[in-house]
Amino acid sequence: MDKAETLYRDLQRKYPANHAVAYALAQLQMSREDYPNALTAIRNARKGQPENVWYAILEADILEKTGRYKDAAALYRELVTANPKESYYYQQWAFYLIKAGDATGAIQVFDQHEQELGFQEEIAQKNICSIGAWEKCRKLPLYSRR
């Protein structure tokens, strides 16, 4: 992987505005658990194309690996603002709030999700499970089928 990283670094020096190169470099560095450099690279990619959701998702993944759950939650809050119909972004936003110890904030995200998209039984069940109500979770139809 050292050759690949060297190649991407050379490409980045030659084409500093190429956000795709920065993204590929961030992916490579993350796979090597080089989180500080991966975070720098993905932030460079996001500067070049801030609306790219894949770049934001990778940044959130890197932040999770470094224990920065509130920062990861903030990225998903941005994604929800830009894409209010995307359930996955609400789920991830709440997930990172829970990991950050903010269950109240996660419940507020679940409420916002329901207000935006309406009540969906399967999502409500996943929400109950994600806040750690495991004894109730196992009794829900979605999980008792497993």
Image (tube, helix red, strand yellow):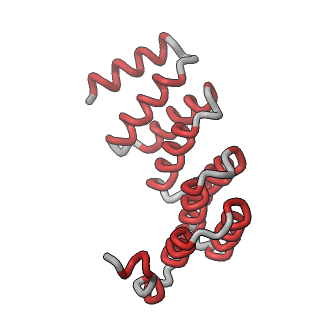
Front residue of 40 and 137: 137
Residue drawn at point x = 47 percent, y = 42 percent:
36
Whether 27 is drawn above or below 146: the answer is: above
Does 90 sit left or right of 59 as displayed?
A: right
Q: Residue furthest top?
A: 14
Residue drawn at point x = 66 percent, y = 46 percent:
83
Q: Quadrant of residue 123?
A: bottom right
Whether 20 is drawn above or below 27: the answer is: above
Front residue of 105 and 101: 105
Where is residue 142? Give x, y as percent.
Answer: 43, 75
Where is residue 80? Give x, y as percent.
Answer: 66, 51
Does 72 sit left or right of 4 as displayed?
A: right
Whether 53 is drawn above or below 109: the answer is: above
Residue drawn at point x = 57 percent, y = 29 percent:
44
Tell me the quarter of the image containing the C terminus.
bottom left
Residue drawn at point x = 56 percent, y = 42 percent:
56
Tell me the quarter of the image containing the N terminus.
top left
Front residue of 43 and 121: 121
Where is residue 13? Give x, y as percent.
Answer: 48, 15
